[in-house]
Amino acid sequence: MALSAADKREIAAMLNAFSERLTTGRQVKSAEEQVLDAVLARALDPMSPLRGGPRYAPLEERVLGEVIETAIIPTKRKKRMSQFNAAVKQGMSTVKASTSYGKKGTINNSKKAFAAVTKTVSKARKGRATPKKGVLGKVARAARKRFKGLKIGRLA
């Protein structure tokens, strides 16, 4: 999902506010403060680094990490279905609705049916001779409508 300009500004403002909070004041903790933090972390989380578990990360760091991850890592969009694949899908639903490859609603030999539909759609796309009757004739007529106006194959 692409971020809008307003979202990017909001994230930038959050990062700036967080970096200001981190950089203002002292940069280094004393030894006593570090020991106290370790003891508190162990009391809050029994899997603290002192016991060999994962590192304890404060809530602010975890939130910042998640914000940065959502802002930087793009989400993958679903690829648009090609016209050929859409025609094959429509053809398979036509075959499933008929009694040619088994009773209505089922396909007995799916590989054979898929091969026949794919070949028929490919022939229709290229403008070659296709079956006139039967379920494959229906598939061919629907595919021709879908590919109407395209210049492909021998006629191109």
Image: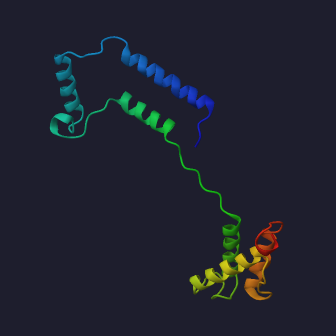
Report the side of 105 relative to 150 (left or right).
Answer: left
Q: How is the image coloured?
A: rainbow
Give percent across and percent down for residue 109: 57, 86
Q: Where 58 sits versus 16, above or below?
A: below
Residue visible at 68% across and 75% down?
Answer: 93
Residue visible at 16% across and 34% down?
Answer: 50
Report the side of 112 relative to 72 (left or right).
Answer: right
Residue 154 figure quarter: bottom right
Q: Where 115 sits versus 59, above or below?
A: below
Quadrant in which the C terminus appears: bottom right
| In-front residue for pair 63/132 | 132
Give percent across and percent down for residue 37: 22, 24
Report the side of 69 relative to 84 (left or right).
Answer: left
Q: How many marks?
A: 0
Residue 45 figure quarter: top left
Report the side of 141 relative to 84 (left or right).
Answer: right
Give percent across and percent down for residue 98: 70, 84
Give percent across and percent down for residue 69: 45, 38
Residue visible at 58% across and 51% down?
Answer: 77
Quadrant in which the N terminus appears: top right
Q: Residue furthest top?
A: 25
Q: Residue furthest right?
A: 149
